[in-house]
Image (cartoon, helix red, strand yellow):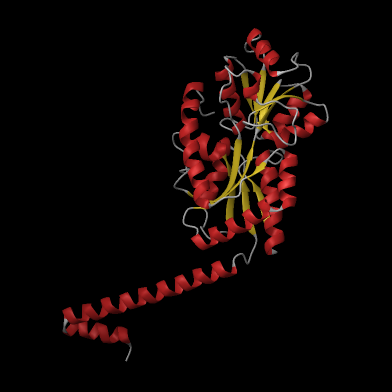
């Protein structure tokens, strides 16, 4: 006899006994479904990935985030034989693409190349973000640190950083600097530089780093303080003039370029404003899938070929654990909040 009919008849004749049977049946069904779900999840982790992966870049093509995402995407494709599709979703300082990933199915097939702007700076600028930098994402892998290079158009009358600071102070408001957008890494780094040097320069936000670089080369803006991978090629070709790098040490790929702190030990004591990048997934992504992604990305970062490529671009590989990357996000959130406040950076 059908179990549901039996329960119904018992419920009619003996409500208490009938309810117990229905509850037991419901629990058994729920337990069975739970086992099925867990089994399916385990199988998906073991076979992951078995379809294309979408890696969201919350900015336009051509910037450092995009360059690193495409490099990592290529390595994942080579390792797993599944295509990694780069999806550029720019807008609102990276928050549009970030929201899309935060709300995606947490199955490991939607990832984001996050960075200092989207995960540590933007949350201090926008009070009502559609995502929480610490709660909406599962940290996967810290990919790289990328020092910012301070570069000017060749027409700017300054051979070094000291001369540029003197020029900017003598011409307040006449120096325009570009960035990949309001709240971007270049924006916060330049505002930090302005605070340290007591200079006044005008921010010109773009929809991505590439158009800002193009306008700097064309002389439409005078200054860029952005990621080395996007700037160094223009410096090597003579289209831009590099004055300093934001890291605590000089770049291996540009050993003659001094650090900002070297320019004036008193004015720029302890100055460091590197960008950092890492892969995140939607919160709730299975831990074993995160671990598999982390291991594969770390293996690619540790390869001599990848390390050499990153150094050439001015980037520093940062293989580590998901926990270490999560701690980096929390630390940087606390670090940049007072800078945003002092600089008076507001939403567009």
Q: Which residue is drawn at 54% across and 58% down?
A: 290
Q: Nearer the viewer, residue 256 or 281?
A: 256
Please say if 88 is above or below 37. Answer: above
Q: Nearer the viewer, residue 336 or 263?
A: 263
Residue 32 at x, y percent in the picture: 39, 77
In the foreground, 43 or 4: 43
Q: What is the total number of numbered labels drawn onto the structure image?
A: 0
Q: Residue furthest bottom?
A: 1
Q: Percent from the top left, x then y, of residue 259?
A: 66, 26
Task: Please indicate, yes or no, whether residue 103 appears anywhere in the rendered image.
Answer: no
Foreground of the two, 65 or 205: 65
Residue for point 55% across, 19% down? 195
Quarter of the picture containing the N terminus is bottom left
Residue 100 shows in this picture: yes
Residue sitting at x 45%, y 71% = 37
Left or right: 9 with respect to 125? left
In the visual, does 278 lie left or right of 227? left
Toward which corner of the image does residue 171 lie, by quadrant? top right
**Image quarter in which the C terminus is found:** top right
Q: Position of residue 310 (x, y in %)?
A: 71, 44
Is residue 4 shown left or right of residue 265? left
Q: In which quarter of the image is residue 257?
A: top right
Most extreme residue toward the top is: 170
Expressed as whole percent of the image width and height from the top left, the position of residue 341 reads 47, 25
* Quadrant hosting residue 316: top right
Residue extending furthest toward the right: 237
């Amino acid at each position: 006899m059908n179990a549901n009919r039996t329960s119904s008849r018992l419920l009619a004749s003996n409500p208490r006994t009938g309810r117990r049977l229905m509850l037991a049946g419901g629990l058994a069904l729920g337990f069975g479904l739970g086992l099925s779900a867990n089994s399916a999840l385990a199988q998906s982790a073991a076979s992951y990935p078995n379809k294309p992966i979408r890696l969201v870049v919350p900015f336009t093509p051509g910037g450092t985030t995009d360059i690193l995402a495409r490099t990592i995407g290529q390595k994942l494709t080579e390792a797993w034989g599944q295509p990694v599709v780069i999806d550029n979703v720019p807008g609102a300082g990276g928050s549009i693409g970030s929201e899309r990933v935060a709300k995606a199915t947490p199955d490991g097939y939607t990832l984001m190349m996050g960075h200092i702007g989207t995960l540590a700076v933007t949350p201090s600028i926008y009070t009502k973000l559609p995502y929480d930098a610490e709660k909406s994402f599962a940290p996967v892998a810290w990919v790289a640190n990328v020092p910012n290079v301070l570069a000017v158009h060749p027409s700017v009358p300054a051979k070094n950083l000291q001369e540029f600071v003197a020029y900017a102070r003598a011409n307040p408001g006449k120096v325009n600097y570009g960035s990949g957008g309001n709240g971007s890494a270049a924006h916060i780094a330049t505002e930090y530089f302005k605070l340290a040097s007591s200079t006044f320069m005008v921010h010109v936000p773009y929809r991505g780093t590439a158009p800002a670089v193009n306008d700097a080369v064309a002389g439409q803006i005078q200054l860029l303080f952005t990621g080395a991978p996007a700037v160094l090629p223009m410096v090597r070709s003579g289209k831009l003039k590099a004055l300093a790098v934001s890291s605590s040490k000089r770049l291996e790929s540009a050993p003659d370029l001094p650090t900002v702190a070297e320019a004036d030990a008193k004015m720029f004591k302890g100055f460091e404003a590197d960008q950092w990048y890492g892969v995140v997934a939607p919160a709730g992504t299975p831990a074993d899938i995160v671990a598999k992604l982390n291991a594969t990305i770390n293996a690619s970062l540790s390869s001599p070929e990848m390390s050499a490529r990153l150094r050439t671009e001015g980037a520093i590989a940062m293989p580590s654990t998901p926990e270490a990357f999560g701690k980096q996000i929390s630390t940087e959130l606390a670090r940049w909040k007072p800078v945003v406040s002092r600089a008076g950076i507001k939403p567009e």
